[in-house]
Image: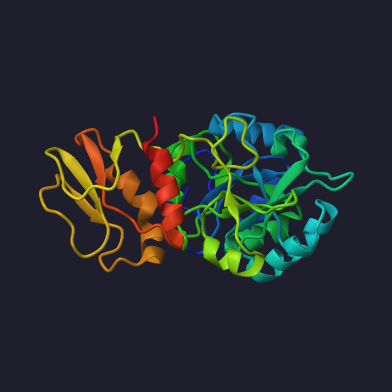
Amino acid sequence: MPPLALQQGCQISVTTRLSSAEIDRAAALIRAGRLVAFPTETVYGLGGDATNDETVAAIFSAKSRPSFNPLIVHLLRADEAERLAEIDGRAALMMQRFWPGPLSLVLRRAPRCPISLLASAGLDTLALRVPAHPVAQALLRASGRPIAAPSANRSGKVSPTTANDVAAELDGRIDAILDGGACRVGIESTVLDLSGQKPMLLRPGGVALEAIEALLGPIEQAADSDTPSSPGMLASHYAPTTPLRLNATSVNAGEALLAFGPNAPSGAAKSLSLSDSGNLDEAAAHLFAMLRALDRPEFSAIAVMPIPETGLGRAINDRLRRAATR
């Protein structure tokens, strides 16, 4: 078989050109209740028909994901959210400003909402977003379904930012992978809970907290939970096998270095830089790919240089802290 961007049951070759026929084949799989990995601007998602209980259960099974950990449902347009959830003025403002884009909103489920309750882990809320990636948009349009899509990796492991990452994690467990190249943002979406009286940040991500607070005012951050109301709230998550040592200003013998900024210490067994110039957007885009590259048994640990706790740095530090928790 010649290499294709969409193949079933095997690893794929890397190509960024997807034909309409390949999108249509993937959409047919979604409508048939099968699982398709696809790119978003944040990370690759493992998608299935969000209205199909068996399909949603298969997503949890493929990832070995705890069933109490809710999924994010992806939509083609913001107006599709109106039949799924209760939209107040705050939600409408967030949708207008940040959709399509890397912001997920947790809202109260609408009466007769068709989304599988398993996708919400049995809660009366629903996490929704409209992705900006053209391949994600094309798949949603062609399938005509809301798509439940957590990150396309084994539960608790480093999120995938390329199609090859997905194949390494889930080959043999899913039906197809759409390759749209490397993800632009590189970390998951920000999750904002608007289901209660006060807005609550459940997970920092691709939209900076400062941008949200400029519109809604000060926002509290929810504590980690063993019974999360959104993805990304478990204390241990996004974890490589090699231990992480955070806020490192020097390197110990046998350690790899995940550097940031122009003044990286010497002496690492291997060194990769999130951004030589200290650019947080660049660092976010590189984070998961570089964690994967340094996750090797020959290294005693991965020393990670300090990251500023501002803008996307807040999301980067959130992922690093969870990855370091064992």
* Residue depicted at 65% across the width and 62% down the height: 138
The number of discs equals 0
Q: Is residue 258 left or right of residue 322?
A: left
Answer whether residue 15 is visible to the viewer in this image. no
Q: Residue 155: x percent and y percent?
A: 51, 34
| Front in this rendered view, residue 59 or 71 | 71
Above or below: residue 303 compared with residue 172: below
* Residue depicted at 46% across the width and 37% down the height: 237
* Residue depicted at 64% across the width and 29% down the height: 67
| Front in this rendered view, residue 274 or 223 | 223
* Residue depicted at 70% across the width and 38% down the height: 119
Residue at the extreme right of the image, as rendered: 112
Above or below: residue 89 compared with residue 84: below
Q: Is residue 148 left or right of residue 168?
A: right
Above or below: residue 86 compared with residue 112: below
Q: Residue 312: x percent and y percent?
A: 45, 60
